[in-house]
Image (cartoon, helix red, strand yellow):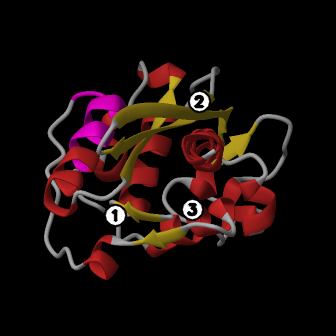
């Protein structure tokens, strides 16, 4: 089954392709022939994911899914949340992590969660899937694997950040993969 993933992010594509496995042809935006930006004007992860998926579905009329992911930190009242990618005012992971660590200085409660929402649209159906991984914010940046906030996020039950894990280790507990597994079960149910 051919599915467009409304992203060109190579890290996300690698995670998604690994999780999908055989039987699916996952196509990025550029591979589908789309160049440009997709509007993201929602105030929730759900709205942004749906808006991106609908935008691409309207152009190609083939199954498409889009995700939006947020890092939600309890001590920061759920921030950065929907603004995770540009929390510092720019799309710079180092600046974003520095801002979070600065705001977290001295915070006793460092609990946080990564939450991914996937919107899947076909000609007959629109469905949302969610994946969550709980953890905490580290005191400092550590590790060189992964991307985004991985160097400051320690998943529950671990002493290492996501950035200190291999892709396989991270994949076993990854929020995006958890949401994607729900999508895969749904898609397999549609074709049964």
* Residue 1 placement, left or right of 133: left
**Image position, residue 110 (x, y; %):** 62, 28
- How many residues crowd mark 1 within 10 Å: few (<14), some (14–19), many (20+)? some
From the viewer's perspective, is residue 39 above or below residue 111? below
Q: Is residue 26 visible?
A: yes
* Residue 52 placement, left or right of 31: left
User: Of circles 3 and 1, which is in front?
Assistant: 3
Label drawn at residue 109: none
Please identify the quadrant where the C terminus is shown.
Answer: top right
The residue carrying mark 2 is 112
Rendered residue at 18%/45% (across/down): 40
Q: CA distance from mark 2 to mark 1?
A: 20 Å
Q: Is residue 46 magenta?
A: yes
Q: Does the magenta stretch mainly form a helix, a strand or a loop?
A: helix
Q: Secondary structure at mark 1?
A: loop
Rendered residue at 63%/20% (across/down): 109
Q: Is residue 61 magenta?
A: no
The residue carrying mark 3 is 16
The residue carrying mark 1 is 92
Rendered residue at 57%/66% (across/down): 24
Q: Secondary structure at mark 3?
A: helix
Q: Are marks 3 and 1 in contact (CB under 8 Å)?
A: no
Sooner in the amino-acid sequence: mark 2 or mark 3: 3
**Image position, residue 169 (x, y; %):** 81, 59
Magenta extent: 43-52
**Image position, residue 81 (x, y; %):** 38, 33
């Amino acid at each position: 089954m051919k599915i467009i993933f409304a992203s060109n992010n190579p890290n996300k594509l690698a995670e998604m392709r690994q999780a999908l496995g055989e039987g699916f042809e996952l196509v990025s935006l550029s591979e589908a022939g789309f160049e440009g930006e997709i509007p993201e004007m929602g105030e929730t992860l759900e709205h942004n994911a749906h808006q991106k998926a609908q935008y691409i579905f309207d152009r190609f009329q083939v199954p498409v899914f889009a995700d939006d992911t947020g890092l939600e930190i309890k001590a920061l009242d759920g921030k950065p949340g929907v603004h995770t990618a540009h929390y510092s005012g720019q799309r710079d992971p180092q600046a974003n992590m520095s801002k979070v660590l600065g705001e977290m200085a001295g915070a006793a409660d460092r609990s946080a969660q990564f939450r991914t929402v996937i919107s899947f649209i076909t000609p007959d159906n629109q469905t949302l899937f969610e994946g969550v991984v709980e953890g905490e914010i580290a005191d400092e940046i550590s590790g060189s694997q992964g991307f985004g906030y991985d160097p400051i996020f320690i998943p529950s039950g671990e002493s290492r950040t996501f950035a200190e894990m291999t892709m396989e280790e991270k994949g076993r507990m990854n929020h995006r993969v958890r949401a994607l597994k729900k999508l895969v079960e749904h898609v397999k149910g549609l074709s049964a």
